[in-house]
Amino acid sequence: MPDRLPDDLRDRAAAIRLAVFDVDGVLTDGRLWYSEEGRELKAFHVHDGLGLKRLLANGIEVAIITARMSHLVTERMAELGVAHVYQGQKDKLACLQLLCDALQLPLQQVCYTGDDLPDLRAMLATGLPIAPANAHPWVAERARWQTRHNGGEGAAREVCDLLLHAQGLTNAELAHWL
């Protein structure tokens, strides 16, 4: 994370109280794996998981909004302590608006990380739309910020680190681990 962020990005990231992530293509590499028995498999990056946990520990809410249904997502998010998990969401913006109403948060205090067209409306409604490095070009060009890492390879951790840095929590985070 650079010491000096552009003012607009720093200000937007400093205001975030809810970080929302898509799953396939953001928390995973986007590939769909199936076993011989037809069971779905997913791989999650451990760095992303720790980033999500550190957001929660620092008072930043975390939510998952995904169009697909997956028991693996349910299990992984429970393991990380993520309470706001919305699967099978065809209208991600409507889901996001309901969540923000429940949390009494304006959309300007939300960042949304998505990689493809189903994420676009929800992303663009938030104060900080983010795309991973391997996002579809139509999504990437509309994001306010793009990670250096691909989805499933640490992109979500970059988002978490950006938020913690912009909110002045980097030193406290490092001290926690030293």
Image (cartoon, rainbow, N blue to C red):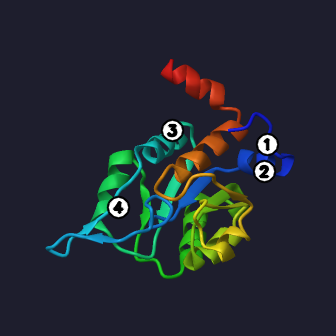
Q: Residues within 10 Å of mark 1 (few under 14, many from 20)?
A: some
Circles 1 and 2 in contact, beta carbons < 8 Å: yes
Residue 118: image tag: none
Tell me how far mark 2 sits from mark 4, CA to CA.
Answer: 30 Å
**Residue at horizontal 73%, vertical 70%?**
141
Closer to the chain start, of discs 4 and 3, is 3
Tell me how far mark 4 sits from mark 3, CA to CA.
Answer: 19 Å
Q: Which residue is mark 2?
A: 9
Q: Which residue is mark 1?
A: 5
**Considering only vertical position in the picture, is 161 above or below 78?**
above
- Amino acid tagged 1: Leu
- Amino acid tagged 3: Arg
**Residue at horizontal 56%, vertical 37%?**
58
Tell which of 111 and 103 is nearer to you: 111
Tell me how far mark 1 sits from mark 2, CA to CA.
Answer: 7 Å
Closer to the chain start, of discs 3 and 2, is 2
Q: Mark 2: which secondary structure?
A: helix
Closer to the chain start, of discs 4 and 1, is 1
- Amino acid tagged 2: Leu
Q: Which residue is mark 3?
A: 54
**Residue at horizontal 39%, vertical 47%?**
81
